[in-house]
Image (cartoon, rainbow, N blue to C red):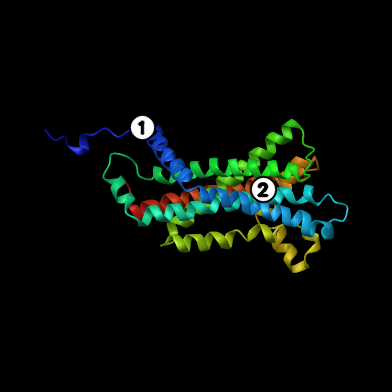
Amino acid sequence: MIQNLSSIKEPSQMVTSGVFISRSLLHSLRNAEVLIMAIMLPIMLMLMFTYVFGGAISPGGDYVNYVVPGIILLCAGFGSSSIAVEVTTDMTNGIIDRFQTMPIRSIHVITGHVVASVARNLLATAIVFGIALLVGFRPAASLGAWFGAVGVITLFILTFTWLFAAIGLVVKSPAAASGYGFVLLFLPYLSSAFVPTSTMPVWLQGVANNQPITPVIETIRALLMGNPIHDHIWWALGWCVLILAASLIWSTWLFHRKAGRR
């Protein structure tokens, strides 16, 4: 006797999320090139800025201590941007339609991508940080400051992962998703990641000082190097929470609009 599909009990949200997280992690393992590029590109930039430009920017030789926090966020940005392509691929290849025929909430596919991306990016960030120690990075953080820095980095990764997930839902093709992600990755270059904003033209300082990346970098730099944190941490947390909340709402609305609410 064929069982009515409507009578099949829907699995718990935790079980459904776990299945989609496992699916995304398996895709990450099978697509190792994305993880490798997310690690290698920031490492290459760190080596270039440290050994090629570092002597000119900071003749004292301590430029590596200044640039590493910016490189860490750049690594997080590169890693997070790949989720836009993954989400767009799922939305355009028909897999969502198949999920909607099952007794599950198909929006968990987005959650799976986000959790897997955050885990992947934390691993990539840890590797980049290890290389930074090898090239001379010498943090002076206390144990509490270490926990604070890791917390801010994790929040930043989560925030921009959800933002890129929303972008993946907006665009119509994986190629377009990659292009939009590339545009956002220019933000660290217009911040205090590589040089103090005071060295920039006056008109550019206003942009650099008042965009989301600069307070996050300054917070991480202050925590890792034992410097005064001032009010950077409140601006960093405020920007991250605001962007995260907006991205969550935007992603949910876009998904239900495109795939249909279950």
**Residue 71: percent from the left, percent from the top?**
68, 51
How far, Cα to Cα, is label 1 from label 2?
A: 36 Å
How packed mark 1 is, by other alpha carbons closer than 10 Å (few <14, some 14-19, many 20 or more), is: few
Q: Earlier in the sequence, mark 1 or mark 2?
A: 1
Q: How many marks?
A: 2
Locate the N terminus and report the quarter of the image it occupies: top left
Q: Residue at x 74, y 42 (%)?
A: 134
| Residue 16 appears left or right of 225 | left
**Residue 91: percent from the left, percent from the top?**
37, 54
Looking at the picture, tell me which residue is in the foreground, 34 or 179. 34
Question: According to the image, label 1 marks what residue?
Answer: 12
Question: According to the image, label 2 marks what residue?
Answer: 72
Q: Would residue 246 be seen by someone viewing this image from the given angle?
A: no
Looking at the picture, tell me which residue is in the foreground, 177 or 52. 52
**Three-letter code for the amino acid on which mark 2 is drawn:** Ile
Q: Residue at x 75, y 63 (%)?
A: 205
**Residue 248: percent from the left, percent from the top?**
48, 48
| Residue 48 appears left or right of 120 | right
